[in-house]
Image (cartoon, rainbow, N blue to C red):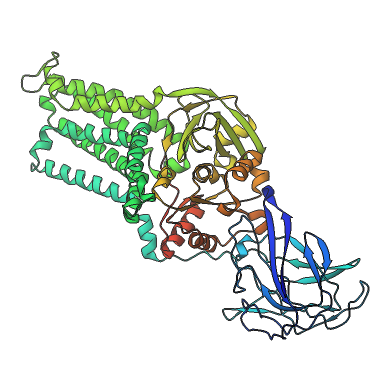
């Protein structure tokens, strides 16, 4: 005769997620005495079990007496007695330590003596899901205190769980202190891995574009490229127009839409293979390499052309040379202001110079094109009939470039916004209407100054609202949102796509974010059941408020999320956490949103472990 008994202890933790403690103990009458196994995961791991008298069944806090039995096995949640990992958010699995009751039942006041023949309970499989609180297990009153032994794992000694005996009435309690967070031991990347991550698709695009153009300029200078000599304006404006195109929100949305449309069926079929889908995502994410390469190349062609005009000043009109020099200066300033160091450390300086000086350059480009094509060099006269102007490709490039620059501003609106300030570190902005996942929006307090990009959170196109998470450490703009919340704000209604927008290309994936990175990551997991969320932050519910916590609680099942509170659990071993989740979830790719240090660490770790991953780009 046998009976199975389960005891579940619910422990309320952050954001309303419970930490469950599951125990499955099989008892049989008259079973033979079993000896300890050396395997900590073995059902018989521990000392010899002696007969017990009237054990109690623990069910939902109630105590029920059963007939006299022997404890024959200890099951940790799987048929073979091995610990089974749980994918619940901040969920732990543990077992009651095996106990020997050789003496009659003692009263609460009876003295106890230590026993050295019983081991500590096996260590849970997923330490990273442990919460640093104390779980109290009601058990039968003991005549002996359960002894603690050191477990050995991989030949290394580990500290046991400290147990403290307390008597309370007729029921004795053993408090089991859960282990601290695992030590943070980042993976050390090799020089080759670091080089691969540095020389990414962005720099590959940049290298190809710049190399092609600079070789062309050299050939033109030595007279080996006659086509370029006759159509130098086309090379200048063609590069600049392409640079603007790569940064156009509407073009980017169309490109993402087409790639998702063509490759989306990969989630249900075996084609295309993962390598093609990864290449498509990498290409879309690093289009900025083409933007930078073409902008620099167009500037180089412009410098070459102005130098050529100055060398041949005898046959050129002074107005053409003057406008060429002014245009050159404006374009050079605009390009220099977009260098990574300026863009990342002096954002306002970058934006003002890149935008306003760039617009000045566009105006002088129009003048330069009209004067250059309207002046007849052979006869030294002006031809304003327009026949010469419309015959050149320059005018069509400059028209296209003007439209691409103006188009996003046509969709700029001042909209109503509700601001929630859950803490001094974060502002949560709520806007009308829902939207698809993987999009980012630009907002500003003014119509043309200081636009900043933030990820959008939405439950889908059908939702009533979408949200932005703005962290105060980011700069003066976000700090001002907390100190002086606006009621209306300027935004571009057409949002631009980010790497998360390609999440539909993968059968399963992991979206990991730290801190305010949840703003760019959450929508993907809210709108797809195939994506697992890992969010590492400090006291998330208190810091980010009930709005974000509610979206996670209502939209992502506990088995699809891990919310790591670094304030309570300390800093996690991020790569161990990520690797275990990646294997258990059966993911194809990992998308990372973190600060520079966290992004670097995770990207290097994933590369070393062979996990496909895409990280944060500071290239907006």
Image point 55% across, 52% down: which residue? 560
- For the question of whether residue 537 can be seen, the reply is yes
User: Quick check: 341 above or below 358?
Assistant: below
Which quarter shows the C terminus? Answer: top left
- For the question of whether residue 424 can be seen, the reply is no
Image point 10% across, 43% down: which residue? 222
Residue 39, given in percent of the width and then of the height, sits at 61, 81
Foreground: 374 or 567?
567
User: Quick check: 464 above or below 539?
Assistant: above
Q: Is residue 250 left or right of residue 370?
A: right
Residue 46, given in percent of the width and then of the height, sits at 69, 81
Looking at the image, how many numbered discs can be counted on the residues?
Answer: 0
Q: Quadrant of the rendered structure where residue 6 is?
A: bottom right
Foreground: 2 or 203?
2
Residue 522, given in percent of the width and then of the height, sits at 53, 44
Residue 332, given in percent of the width and then of the height, sits at 31, 35
User: Quick check: 281 above or below 577?
Assistant: above
Q: Is residue 68 left or right of residue 512?
A: right
Which quarter shows the N terminus? Answer: bottom right
Foreground: 328 or 55?
55
Q: Is residue 14 left or right of residue 109?
A: left
User: Quick check: 141 above or below 564?
Assistant: below
Q: Is residue 390 left or right of residue 359?
A: left
Residue ranking furthest to the front: 1
Q: Quadrant of the rendered structure where residue 253 is?
A: top left
Foreground: 201 or 434?
434
């Amino acid at each position: 005769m046998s009976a199975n008994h389960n005891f579940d202890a619910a422990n309320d933790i952050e954001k309303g997620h419970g930490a469950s403690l599951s125990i499955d103990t099989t008892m049989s009458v008259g079973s033979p005495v079993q000896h300890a196994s050396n395997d900590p995961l073995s059902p018989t791991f521990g000392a010899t079990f002696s007969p017990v008298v009237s054990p109690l069944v623990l069910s939902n806090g109630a105590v029920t007496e059963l007939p006299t039995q022997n404890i024959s096995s200890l099951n940790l949640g799987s048929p073979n007695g091995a610990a089974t990992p749980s994918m619940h958010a901040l969920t732990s699995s543990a077992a009651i330590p095996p106990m020997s009751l050789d003496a009659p039942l003692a009263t609460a006041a009876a003295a106890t003596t230590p026993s050295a023949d019983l081991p500590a309970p096996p260590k849970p499989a997923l330490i990273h899901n442990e919460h640093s609180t104390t779980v109290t297990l009601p058990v039968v009153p003991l005549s002996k205190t359960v002894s603690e032994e050191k477990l050995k794992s991989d030949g290394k000694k580990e500290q046991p769980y400290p147990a403290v005996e307390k008597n309370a009435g007729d029921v004795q309690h053993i408090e089991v202190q859960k282990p601290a967070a695992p030590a943070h031991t980042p993976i050390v990347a090799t020089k080759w891995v670091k080089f691969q991550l540095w020389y990414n698709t962005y720099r590959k695009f940049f290298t190809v574009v710049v190399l092609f153009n600079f070789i062309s300029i050299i050939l033109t200078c030595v007279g080996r490229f006659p086509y370029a000599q006759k159509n130098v304006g086309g090379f200048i404006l063609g590069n600049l127009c392409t640079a603007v195109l790569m940064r156009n929100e509407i073009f980017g949305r169309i490109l993402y839409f087409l790639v998702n449309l063509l490759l989306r069926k990969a989630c249900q079929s075996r084609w295309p293979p993962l390598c093609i889908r990864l290449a498509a995502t990498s290409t879309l994410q690093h289009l900025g390499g083409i933007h930078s390469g073409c902008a620099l190349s167009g500037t180089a062609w412009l410098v070459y052309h102005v130098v050529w005009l100055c060398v041949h000043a005898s046959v050129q009109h002074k107005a053409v040379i003057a406008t060429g020099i002014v245009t050159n200066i404006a374009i050079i300033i605009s390009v220099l202001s977009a260098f990574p160091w300026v863009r990342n450390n002096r954002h306002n300086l970058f934006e003002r110079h890149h935008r306003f000086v760039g617009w000045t350059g566009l105006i002088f480009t129009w003048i330069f094109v009209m004067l250059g094509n309207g002046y007849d060099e052979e006869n030294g006269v002006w031809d304003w009939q327009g026949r010469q102007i419309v015959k050149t490709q320059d005018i069509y490039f400059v028209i296209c470039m003007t439209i691409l620059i103006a188009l996003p501003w046509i969709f700029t609106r001042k909209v109503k916004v509700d601001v929630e300030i859950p803490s001094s570190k974060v502002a949560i902005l709520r806007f009308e209407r829902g939207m698809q996942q993987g999009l980012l929006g630009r907002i500003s307090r003014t119509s043309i100054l200081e636009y900043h990009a933030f990820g959008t959170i939405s439950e889908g196109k059908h939702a009533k609202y979408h949200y932005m998470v703005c962290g105060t450490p980011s700069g003066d703009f976000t700090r001002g949102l907390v100190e002086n919340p606006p009621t209306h704000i300027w935004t571009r209604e057409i949002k631009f796509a980010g790497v998360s927008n390609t999440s539909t290309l993968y059968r399963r994936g992991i979206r990991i974010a730290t801190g305010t990175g949840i703003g760019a990551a959450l929508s993907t997991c809210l709108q797809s059941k195939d994506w697992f969320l890992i969010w590492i932050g400090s006291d998330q519910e208190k810091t980010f408020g009930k709005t974000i916590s509610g979206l996670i609680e209502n939209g992502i099942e506990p088995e699809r999320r891990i919310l790591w509170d670094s304030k309570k659990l300390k800093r996690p071993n991020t790569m161990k956490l990520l690797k275990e989740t990646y294997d258990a979830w059966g993911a194809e790719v990992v998308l990372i949103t973190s600060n520079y240090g966290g992004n670097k660490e995770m990207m290097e770790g994933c590369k070393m472990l062979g996990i496909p991953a895409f990280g944060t780009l500071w290239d907006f």
